[in-house]
Image (cartoon, helix red, strand yellow):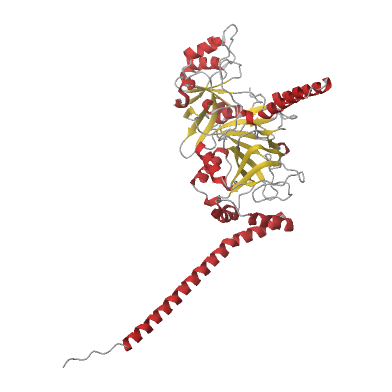
Amino acid sequence: SGHHLPALVQYLLSSTSTMVSASSPSLTTMMLAITTIFCIMAAASAARVFPQRSSEEAAVIEWGHSAIISALDGAVATFGPQTSQGANFEVETAPVLARPIDGVGKKNTEGIKDLELPKLDNADQVAGNMVIMTDAAGLSGVALARIAKESGAAALMVVNTDQNAGDYIYSLEPENEEEEKYAEENIDIPVIMVSLQAGNVITTALATDDMANDVVNTGGALPDRVRLYAGGDRPFFEDAVSKSPVVYLIHNMLTVEECDELIRMADGKYDRVDDTTGINNYLESTMASEKTGEATAKNIDRVTLWKGSIAGKLIKDIDERISQVTGFPPEHFSDFQINKYTAGSSHEPHFDINPANGIMATITIFLNDVAQDQGGEFIFSTPQAEGGDGDGEPVYISPTKALAIVHHNTDDKYNFDQSTIHEEAALLGGYKYVAKKYVYLNPQPKHMRMVLPLMAMPFGGKLPRVFITLQTTLIDKYGIETAEVYFQKIVTMIPLLLLIAIAGAVSNFVTNKLKNDGAGKKGKEATDGKSKKSKPKSKKSD
């Protein structure tokens, strides 16, 4: 169910066990060590570990036309054709609400087994279409699939009605041997689960302000047609924390090739992060440690690839995809910050804060896989419980190539959210590459999107340190607001000064060229004149 010992906890357990066996401790020391082990195990067992979904179990429900397309994520069941056809299953049909919606309703089902329940009341409408049902009656996935199949459905969408589950969905599976055998022999339609929120979205897709509730509740606002297909390598969501902070995962955010290319682009450009100096790098959102003289980012190498509006096709395609999937406008994006971790690297608890450029959300993308026993997990230690009271279970997210973590640093009123504190566990071996993209509260001005990337272009996207030092000096002297005005004016003037310098250089070159050509021409004429004067005249023959 997503609860297991993270790599760091396994490491601590093994270290503690070794310490006990190697030092021949007294009874008191042994009891203390054992108590420590059990405390660690208790903490680890309470943690929720992600990702819990995989591409193999992802499905997409899509409707609309080329201009406006809406889509929902689903989790395919462990039974049905999707388990054997994999990414090849696809259904295009009309969605229909089941009647009764949970397969039971007010019917007297006493003495009737779940696998013997009658077909739906509106089986004639369901036949050949995708039927939408809920799990509110407590029926298993196989029981619901049987009802749908007996009613002639081409596919089944099950809505998870757990009010406290948020966007959580899972793969339905047989609950016993009888169901397993029945599903294997009889269920030949795709079966997926969607969240309650997703169910509300599709059932109100065509709803208008003046549409009566009873029309919506009977399926009158459903799309005319939907396409149901395997997720494959398409991006899909996985909810981690629904509230305080909002944290969700996006699988397949990048392609494998894009991950590799970002690593290549950053190669040879890294600088070691030193946050012990008390100096903030506001331009690249690298803040000094709150603990003076103590590192928060340990053994981390980092570079920001300034590409902005002059980015090539790769970056533009990625930004467009991130915007489409998350809904964040690309004008609010930072450029990619690439982080490289080696054995021993870690990032202690911290917030993503930039006083000079408010960060609304952070998108963290793993660029490579890290083995489960090598650590490096991304951790939210104090999320709010789903019910809204007290602390929830800590969330551990294992580094998985192309997986994106999106967490909101502000609440729905754009106030800073204290629960966004997060950390990255120590990497025990190998390498970890992470790409970060910050979503700022305000659109980024032209000097950030155009001028600074131009200044970084000759260096492969790495901004010369002088610009970072200049902004930090201005902020320290004049404060953030005034310094930003000065910095923007200075930076914006640089291209103009460069153009003037280039124009002056070209003008001087042309002037000198013309002078040289003129002098050469006069010299040639003088030489020709002398040659003519010295030339002997020919005598005419008599």
Q: Is residue 327 visible?
A: yes
Q: Residue 154 location, x and y as percent?
A: 46, 21
Q: Is residue 114 above or below residue 167?
A: above
User: Count of labels shown?
Assistant: 0
Residue 253 image-quadrant placement: top right
Q: Residue 240 location, x and y as percent?
A: 64, 30
Q: Is residue 120 visible?
A: no
Q: Name the residue rendered at 54%, 12% in the picture.
A: 179
Among all residues in the image, which is located at the extreme bottom?
542
Residue nearest the viewer, comparing 206 with 459: 459
Q: Name the residue rendered at 65%, 58% in the picture.
A: 487
Residue nearest the viewer, comparing 78 with 122: 78
Residue nearest the viewer, comparing 322 with 10: 10
Q: Is residue 342 left or right of residue 510?
A: right
Q: Which quarter of the figure is the C terminus placed in?
A: bottom left
Q: Name the residue rendered at 54%, 15% in the picture.
A: 142
Q: Is residue 126 left or right of residue 11?
A: left
Q: Which quarter of the figure is the N terminus placed in?
A: top right
Q: Residue 33 location, x and y as percent?
A: 78, 24
Q: Residue 81 location, x and y as percent?
A: 47, 20
Q: Is residue 22 above or below residue 476?
A: above
